[in-house]
Image: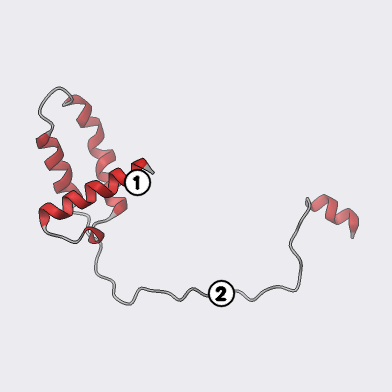
């Protein structure tokens, strides 16, 4: 949960600086940029990290999610219920009983 909140915070900060909606940025793209730039952050640990942070935020804003109107799906069961009961024991036991 902590990692999820960290990633969402980075997305929020990146969107705020570029005047974008935070939900227009890609969660997966943010993870990819963090993993790509992470090895470089340890080399700069003693130096000023603001330039690294700005580069990370700039890279995150390249991964935009396109507007997709009408992408809601109804919450319905897709398959009809079967006439059989659920398997409640291991298969080999059920085979012995039948």
Is 18 situated left or right of 68 in this image?
left
Q: How is the image coloured?
A: secondary structure
Question: Residue 54's image quarter?
Answer: top left
Residue 71 coordinates in the image, percent (x, y)? 35, 73
Question: Residue 79's image quarter?
Answer: bottom right
Q: Residue at x 15, y 60 (%)?
A: 20
Residue 97 coordinates in the image, percent (x, y)? 90, 56
Query: First in sequence: mark 1 or mark 2?
Result: 1
Give the SS element for disc 2: loop
Q: Residue at x 29, y 39 (%)?
A: 35
Mark number, residue 4: 1
Whether tag 1 and tag 2 are in contact, CB under 8 A, the answer is no
Q: Quadrant of the N terminus?
A: top left
* Badge nearest the viewer, 1 or 2: 1
Which sits in the foreground, 84 or 37?
84
Q: Which residue is mark 2?
A: 78
Looking at this view, name the residue that lies furthest to the right. Answer: 97
Is 21 situated left or right of 27 in this image?
left
Residue 61 coordinates in the image, percent (x, y)? 17, 53
| Residue 72, above or below 35 | below
Is 36 situated left or right of 72 in this image?
left
C-alpha span from label 1 to label 2: 31 Å
Which sits in the foreground, 96 or 76?
76
Give the SS element for disc 1: helix
Q: Residues within 10 Å of mark 1 (few under 14, many from 20)?
A: few
Mark number, residue 16: none
């Amino acid at each position: 949960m902590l990692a999820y909140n960290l990633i969402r915070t980075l997305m929020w900060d990146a969107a705020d600086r570029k005047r974008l909606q935070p939900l227009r940025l890609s969660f997966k793209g943010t993870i990819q940029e963090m993993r790509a730039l992470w090895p470089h952050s340890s080399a700069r640990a003693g130096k000023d990290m603001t330039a690294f942070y700005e580069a990370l935020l700039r890279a995150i804003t390249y991964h935009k999610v396109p507007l997709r109107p009408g992408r809601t799906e109804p919450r319905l069961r897709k398959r009809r219920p079967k006439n059989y009961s659920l398997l409640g024991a291991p298969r080999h036991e059920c085979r012995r009983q039948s």
